[in-house]
Image: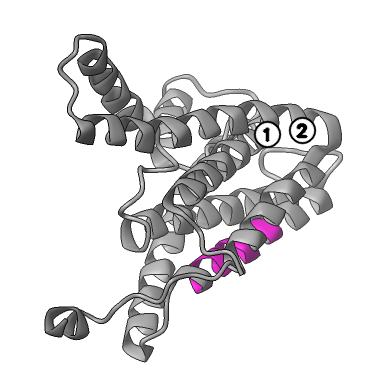
Amino acid sequence: MMKPSDLLLGVSLGLIAGYVDTAGFVALFGLFTAHVTGNFVLIGTELARPSAGHVLPLKLLAIPAFAAGVIVARLLDFRCARLQHNPARPLLLMQFVLLTGFMVAGLAAAPDLAPQAPLVLVAGMLGAAGMGVQNAAGKLEFARLAPTTVMTGNVTGILIDATDMATGRATPPVRERFAKFFWPVLAFAIGCIAGGSAYMWIGFWCLLPALALLAWLAVLDWPVPVPAAAAKAA
């Protein structure tokens, strides 16, 4: 089996995040599944200027669902450490299961989607929980990668490094960091375009390509982490 490279992981996870986040945003009345920042803004907007669609419950429920995804991912990480198992595959499989539930609930709710319909609320919560797992995995297992779900910091870093490169001040580590952050950002942007377009074309079935990519990542030959004690002894 192929061993995943950091570039492959960063690009794949960035693509999945942009794809799922945009598909969810288009499908679920402006809900962000991949990050909570946008939902806080939308909740504030809804409280200040309520819409006729009554989308506030959907946005509110996404916050604890996202938190639950992060917490359960952390607990799974603890369990894997205790059993001396590599947590990468279990975390990716957990995200796969949650996003599959997101798709199934969305398909069951269609074609008459309403912001307060029970299946729509379930779909939103499952999508947010699934992307909460990816956010947690980025901190716990993939910290060596550029963040793959929230791009503001990535773009800021890219622009700073690009300025250094353009003015001749860039060192080799700066060029390496630029590449490390640039490709996931590009993949995220492509995922956003593809996810929104695919939902408009085939509805919630559009999540199948993201699920297939996630499943492929989960079955790759992950390197087994070296225990801390063994690393010190070496």
Quarter the N terminus occupies: bottom right
Whole-percent x, y for residue 228 in the image = 20, 79
**Which residue is under mark 1?**
195
Residue 97 falls inside the magenta stretch: yes
Residue stretch in magenta: 90-100
Q: Note whether residue 57 is visible.
A: no
Element class at badge 2: helix
Mark 2 burial class by Cα count in 10 Å: few <14, some 14-19, many 20+:
some
Q: At label 2, which amino acid type do we have?
A: Ala
Mark 2 near mark 1, Cβ–Cβ under 8 Å?
A: yes
Residue at 57 percent of width and 43 percent of height = 58
Residue at 54 percent of width and 34 percent of height = 187
Which quadrant of the structure image shows residue 113?
top right
Whole-percent x, y for residue 138 in the image = 38, 54
Q: At label 1, which amino acid type do we have?
A: Gly
From mark 2 to mark 1, how far is it between C-alphas? 5 Å
Which quadrant of the structure image shows residue 35?
top left
Residue 130 falls inside the magenta stretch: no
Residue at 64 percent of width and 24 percent of height = 52
Q: Is residue 77 left or right of residue 121?
A: left
Residue at 31 percent of width and 54 percent of height = 143
> Is the residue 231 above or below the residue 162 in the image?
below
Front-lying residue, 186 or 206: 186
**Which residue is under mark 2?**
198
Front-lying residue, 147 or 206: 147
Whole-percent x, y for residue 108 in the image = 82, 53
Q: Note whether residue 173 is visible.
A: yes
Q: How is the image coloured?
A: one colour
Whole-percent x, y for residue 160 in the image = 23, 20
Q: Is residue 166 left or right of residue 210?
A: left
Quarter the C terminus occupies: bottom left
- Dominant SS of magenta comes to helix
